[in-house]
Image: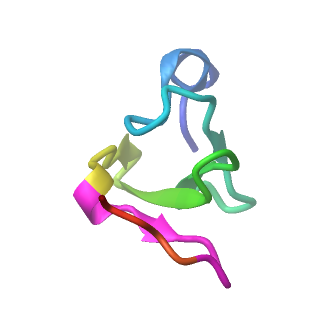
Amino acid sequence: MLDPRLLEILACPQCRGAVEPNADHTRLVCRTCRLSYRVEDDIPVMLIEEAESLEGDQRDDA
């Protein structure tokens, strides 16, 4: 589980908006960009190029 203090300071690297963990804390989700970032061994991988679009959403990298 991610440290709550870390969650307070993390932001989406694309829009700088808030991110929130999913139910099992394996991903951080940005609702604004509709992207999710994986968490590996309690370390968030906050790279835009490694983010995944949320279901049903098309991502525009331009």
- Tell me if residue 34 is in the magenta stretch: no
For this rendering, which residue is in front, 46 or 33?
33
In this view of the protein, which residue sits in the foreground, 56 or 46? 56
Percent x, y for residue 41? 34, 53
Locate residue 14 relative to residue 34 in the image: left or right. Answer: left
Q: Residue at x 61, y 17 (%)?
A: 8
Residue range in magenta is 49-57
Image x and y of residue 25, in percent = 61, 54
Quarter where residue 17 is shown? top right
* Residue 12 pos. (x, y %): 47, 36
In this view of the protein, which residue sits in the foreground, 24 or 12? Answer: 12
Residue beneath the point at 50% across and 27% down: 11
| Among the 4 quarters of the image, the one containing residue 60 | bottom left
User: From the image, which quarter does the N terminus lie in?
Assistant: top right
Quadrant position of residue 39: bottom left
- Tell me: 31 left or right of 62: right
Name of the residue lying farthest toward the right: 23
Residue 49: x %, y % from top left: 24, 60
Q: State which quarter of the image contains the C terminus.
A: bottom left
